[in-house]
Amino acid sequence: MIDPVPHYQARTLDLIRRAIVEPDQETRAELLRQAAYWLDLSKRAVKAKLH
């Protein structure tokens, strides 16, 4: 099985980078909300690997 964690982490970082340079506050908030979702997926995947 392919490890999804690197993909989740890369997606999280990409969204955060886009949010940093985004001038529109509402779009920035949406990007950060999406980043939080991907970060949570990453955290769950790491926990699943440890148990």
Image (spheres, helix red, strand yellow):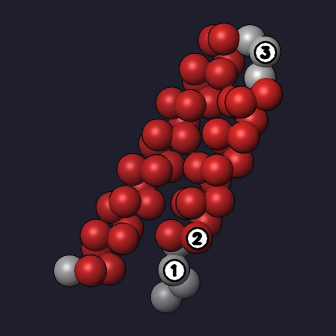
Closer to viewer: mark 2 or mark 3? 3
Q: Amino acid at mark 1?
A: Asp
- Residue 15 shown left or right of residue 41 in the figure: right
Residue type indicated by callout 2 = Pro
Query: What is the crowding at mark 1: few (fewer than 14 residues within 10 Å), some, or many (at least 20)?
Result: few
- Residue at 28% over, 69% down: 47
Circle 3 packing at 10 Å, graded few (<14), some (14-19), many (20+), is few
Q: Quadrant of residue 21?
A: top right
- Where in the figure is residue 39, as x and y percent of width and height? 46, 50
Name the residue beneath numbered marker 2. Answer: 6
Does the CB distance between marks 2 and 1 fall below 8 Å? yes
Question: Which badge, 1 or 3, is on the more N-terminal residue?
Answer: 1
Q: Secondary structure at mark 3?
A: loop
Residue mark closest to the camera, 1 vs 3: 3
Q: Indicate the position of residue 16 as horizontal and vertical percent values.
A: 64, 39
Location of mark 1 (residue)? 3
Q: How far, Cα to Cα, is label 1 from label 3?
A: 34 Å
Q: Choose mark 2 or mark 1, whichever is in front.
A: 2
Residue reaching furthest front?
Answer: 20
Q: Residue at x 70, y 48 (%)?
A: 14
Mark 2 or mark 3, which has the lower sequence index? 2
